[in-house]
Amino acid sequence: MLRPRYPITTDRLLLRPFTPADLHDLHAYESRPDVARYLYWEPRDLDTVRTYLDKKITRTALHHEGDALDLAITLRDTGRLIGNCILIWTSAHHRQGEIGYVLHPDHHGHGYATEVGTPLLRLGFQDLHLHRIVGRLDGRNTASARVLEKLGMRREAHLIHNERVKGEWADEVIYAMLESEWTP
């Protein structure tokens, strides 16, 4: 089980549970086609974002396999919501997890995704005692691949046309890191 102390602080960011007040800032990026491009979902209207926000609000602790921490990424100096990140406990028996992140495009290229990945790995390895953490992405998403590489994750697989996403075949690339490879 893992129930982090919030907020989780980095040099420039705060990771915290979502609140109902995040609706419009969340919609500001989840409604964008360029954000949804490499994700499983299409751009979301306000009602759909509200539905997903209700779920995100409840995802603040890991009690059982399959649970996820789904956290708001905010700027420390302003408190503004700029994205979200996730740590999923995918297997208790195999001690495995997965990380992910989505940022508003106005905040791409500033190193925020890498800054978010570090505490997610720490939570997974140090606090939840996972053995292995993966990051999965659309094979065309080279920016996300660079983030995972900067975090020290290794590219383990490139699965060719393994999924139908938005009506077309898509490649999936899998990065991973073992607990023994993680350096805090």
Image (spheres, helix red, strand yellow):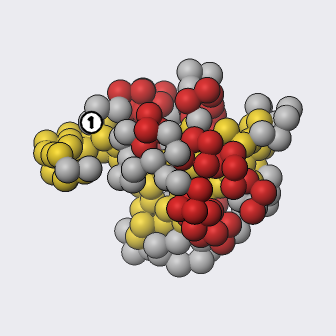
**Residue at figure coordinates x 52%, y 71% from the top left:** 67
Where is the N terminus found, in terms of image quarters? bottom right
| Front residue of this view, candidates 92 and 40 | 40
Q: Is residue 19 above or below residue 61?
A: above
Q: Residue furthest bottom?
A: 64
Q: Is residue 177 visible?
A: no
Query: Residue at 55% across / 30% down in the picture?
Result: 105
Give the residue displayed 78% in from the left and 57% down from the top: 21
Comparing 129 with 99, the one in front is: 99
Question: Can residue 141 be spotted in the picture?
Answer: yes
Q: In the rendered image, which quarter is residue 79 located in? A: top right
Horizontal arrangement in the rendering, residue 49 relative to residue 82 (left or right):
left
The quarter of the picture where residue 171 lies is top left
Residue 175 x/y as whole percent: 35, 42
122 relative to 146 in the view: left or right: right
Q: Which residue has dot 1 on it?
A: 139
Residue 87 drawn at (x, y percent): 54, 57
- Counting from the top left corner in percent of width and height, residue 158 is at 20, 40
At label 1, which amino acid type do we have? Gly
Q: Quadrant of the C terminus?
A: top right
SS of the residue under disc 1: loop
